[in-house]
Amino acid sequence: MTNGYHIVVCGSTVPDPLQTLEPVLTPSGPALKNEMMLPAILDPWAAHALYEAADLAARVAGSKVWLVSVGPKAKLQQVMMTIAQRVNFEFVPVDSSASGFADAHATAAVLAETIQNIPGLDRSRLLVFGGWESASRGAGATMQLVGERLSILDQFQGVDKLNVQADGSFEILERIEAGRHQVSTCLGPPALLGWATGDLPEPRNNPQVGMANMRTVMPALQRAKSVPLPGAGLHYLSASPPKQQRQTRVVKDLSPDQIAHEIAEWIGK
Amino acid sequence: MAQNILFLAHVSEAGSTLPKISYEVLGAALKLRQQTGARLTLGLIGANVEAAAETIAGCGAERILAVTGPDFATSRYASDAAAAEALCRAAAADLILAPATSRFIRVLAGVAHRLNGCVDTHVTSLDVVSGEMCATRWYYRQRIEGVIRRDARPWIVLLESGCGVPWAGVAAKATIEEIPVTLPEAGRRTVVTGIRAPMSDAQTIRPDAGLLFVAGAGWTKKQADGKPHVDQAETLILDFLRVSGASLGGSKSLVDQSGESQAVLHFMTHLNQVGQTGSTPRHPKGLSTCCHGEEPHVVGWRFINERRAVNLDPNCGWARGKADVLYVADAFEVMAKLNALFRQSDGGQHSHETVDQLA
């Protein structure tokens, strides 16, 4: 690949997984209690996609990475304070809802339109990355809908590995049942990859990368368009946390031998 | 209310049957047909679907449609999307039920877009409430359960495994209507070349196992003598998997250690991870050891029915209120005894067989 790839990563914010989430009903449907107060992170699977994109761009000269995020401006800014220090990218924010209760179809429409409007994007070199699902809606559908809107027929989900071959084709490993991977070869871009965890560690914070990114991140946030997400046709009848609380029997006074016997008997039932 | 229901399935890798989860979805489709009086059509995709079709032909569906041929043998977006789209159009379905297999999760959202319809995945139940079709699914990684309905049709619903009673009728001769689909050249840019098992000594992920064994980061930490015993931990865990047939899950902190140059269990990969950014497996029983995470861990265990934990901390947040039994004990000692018990009950036979297979 002589001119490199144009890699667009789709990813938004989700509440920090250590937070307790409580649904509340609003006139526009369910939401999280104190949603704007909850600390946010970049969606974990989208983050893996971003790190893989940056790694690929670093290996193939002429490549460039964009991060397209649909979420509340304040949350995006908060998350950028950490993410922007990790890898190089150009930020393309859209000020809108990142709620898990938003419709995947509406989010996909906004993402696809935003990607189509990125100046200078070469569709023949396009790779669209994202998480195979999010930690909010968990639909596992948004990326496919984006791909259809962009007329991308080569789509892969649950990707853990992308190898660029000598002839420019890709070898792609996708997660399938029973802890295995399906191996495919694809002639090259355009393609869409929904990443699982990949196999790269989280990059360390690099203040120099952060400073370079923030020069474009803040103006991009200021320019971000505010877009409503239509939820027409999707109705929530209820949204509630699981109520089940188990009565845990705490066993402190048995020997390892006795515990092993009890567990073996339980497994054998 | 649905008037035409399409049960959509693909043949299994073996080619002669359907994936196990498909029979659960068929059970759900038949129940809905009974409730709504809708017509039921079966739609199948594969290189050759005859044998698989016969396994469900006795369910009483009005029609059996199929897209077949070498182009549709493997799990590929372009060909599967074309096949599923053709079947949905041929059935004129307003409700499409499909199993949440990796093959269909990849493709059916795109098909919904082509049909100008909508899609919902990870659905755990589908019911008729006050004359309306309602789907139940989880949000925020199994922390919030929502019930939804949609106006748009066709509505494609991917149902999760372990949530319904599988249809178990007798096989019958199938009369199949072939739906012709010609794949454009652009649909052949991707070629599936094979299946690869994870880089492990053994296949440690067993979706059909009766027990999920979850190992936490405590296995790699310093023990009572002030030193970590990772080799011993590996032996104990692998021995247990061999003798019990359990499936292995890992906490995020344990799996992440491999990327942080810390002591690791070498067979533990991201594929084993349960909870946040991991899977939410469905097994009847779960046994966790040396796990200390709270909410992320509970998320991974949402669909485990009976849960027990072995942990040195009696106040462990994840176990209290979430597990049925918490054994306050050293997991190294308990697992050694447990392995010995399993070997004893097997007369050592099972252990030796599997050790040979795994060597």
Image (cartoon, coloured by chain):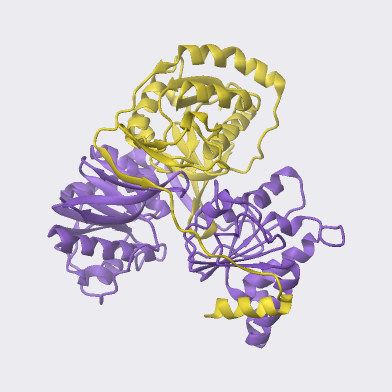
Chain colours: A yellow, B purple
* Quarter location, residue B117: top left
Residue B338 location, x and y as percent? 68, 76
Above-or-below relation of B264 to B212: above
Q: Quadrant of the C terminus of chain B?
A: bottom right
Q: Residue at x 36, y 29 (%)?
A: A150
- Residue at the farthest bottom position: B347
Instruction: Judge from the rendering whether residue B253 lies leftward or rightward of residue A145; answer left or right.
Output: right
Residue A7 location, x and y as percent? 51, 27
Above-or-below relation of B4 to B190: below
Total tally of numbered discs in the picture: 0
Residue A260 location, x and y as percent? 67, 77
Instruction: Judge from the rendering whether residue A134 lies leftward or rightward of residue A230; answer left or right.
Output: right
Above-or-below relation of A150 to B165: above
Residue A122 visible at all: no
Residue A224 visible at all: yes
Q: Residue at x 65, y 16 (%)?
A: A212
Above-or-below relation of B344 to A4: below
